[in-house]
Image (spheres, helix red, strand yellow):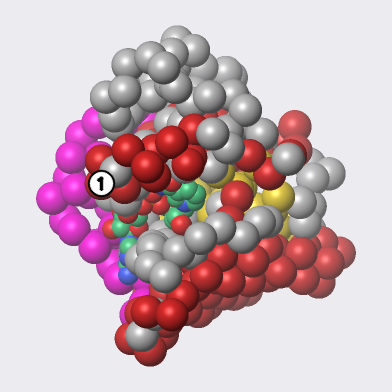
Amino acid sequence: MRRGGDTRLQPGGGNGAGMSEAPKFSVDLSGQVAVVTGAGRGIGRSIALALAQAGARVIAVARTQKDLDELCAAAEGQMEGWAADVLDEGFYRRIEGMERIDILVNNAGGNRPMPMVEVDCETLDSLIALNIRSVYLTAQAAARRMVAQGKGVIINMSSQMGHVGSPRRTVYCMTKHAVEGLTKAMAVELGPQGVRVVSVAPTFVVTPMTEPMFADPDFSKFVFDRIPMGKLAQPEDVAAAVLFLASPAAALINGDSLKVDGGWTAQ
Ligand code: NAD
């Protein structure tokens, strides 16, 4: 979707730069085991497909079996689906019990945009539970395994809202700033044990989570006015950043946040 161009939202439709469902650059992750949470749709789906295409054995985590079946059928490479809720304690035990885990993409998350004065306790608690508590406990479970292996990379899905504030997003911004803090502190603590921890911070990405928001022309203008590149991110743009950070090319990148925001936060 590009300002002044075709305004239809095209999930998975590429960003006009010739990208298809998986980023077109070569990363070899063969022999590595990757877990991607929230992989049933949106950004997580694209990341899972990209990691599998790069040769990793991918465990895709989502709550809906049908989404997992479709994803596994679409994958070029090794993909296994785990129907699980990232809020469940049993999920963390299952991660800890894995024989090995080289890459965790801690992607599951959500948002409920609303004015701060209207935020209720249920909304606050739900978003903290999903965007902070589950991210922490999933990262902790993977870290236990990775420390025992002496190797691994954890990629936390943050947002440009983990770096700046924005209206109707007090809870979301708070939780994504927390993710950035977790990334830095884990990187400092676990780096000496061979585990890298990084964040990816996208601008608005065309996904089922954001699509309804762009039905509002005022919101659409607000967003495009703030992205110097004049277009939204596609899931493939985020998957490309994840692929790079998971790869040996990023071996010394630790505790950083890679913004995929078209320049939103540079202003
Ligand atoms: P989405 O709503 O399209 O997908 C979120 C995924 O997480 C879905 O597969 C959903 O089923 C899963 N999920 C939610 N709760 C879960 C739970 N309890 N257990 C297991 N899975 C669960 O959202 P998305 O846009 O693909 O977002 C993915 C991540 O990217 C989130 O962390 C989000 O905050 C972040 N992000 C999104 C955007 C955007 O514009 N879409 C921008 C920046 C960051």
- On whether residue 64 falls in the magenta region, the answer is yes
Residue furthest left in the image: 66
Q: Nearer the viewer, residue 238 or 137?
A: 238
Amino acid type at mark 1? Pro
Q: Position of residue 172 (x, y in %)?
A: 49, 66
Query: Does residue 32 appear in this view?
Result: no
Query: Does residue 249 appear in this view?
Result: yes
Q: Position of residue 28 (x, y in %)?
A: 59, 28
Give the image quadrant in which the ligand numbered 1 is located. Answer: bottom left
Is residue 43 positioned above or below 172 on the image? above
Residue furthest bottom in the image: 121
Q: Position of residue 29 (x, y in %)?
A: 57, 34
- The secondary element bearing badge 1 is classed as helix
Answer left or right for 81 relative to 225: left
Identify residue for label 1. Answer: 212
User: Is the C-beta of the residue carrying label 1 under 8 Å from the nearest atom of ligand 1?
Assistant: no
* Labels in figure, total: 1
Q: Residue at x 66, y 56 (%)?
A: 164
Q: Give the residues drawn in magenta, as a range.
A: 62-90
Q: Position of residue 190 (x, y in %)?
A: 78, 67
The quadrant in which residue 162 appears is bottom right
- On whether residue 135 falls in the magenta region, the answer is no
Is residue 2 positioned above or below 139 on the image? above
Q: Residue at x 43, y 36 (%)?
A: 221
Q: Residue at x 68, y 56 (%)?
A: 163
Answer left or right for 26 relative to 181: left
Is residue 68 positioned above or below 127 on the image? above
Structural crowding at the residue carrying mark 1, measured as other residues with C-alpha within 10 Å and reported as few (<14), some (14–19) or many (≥20): few
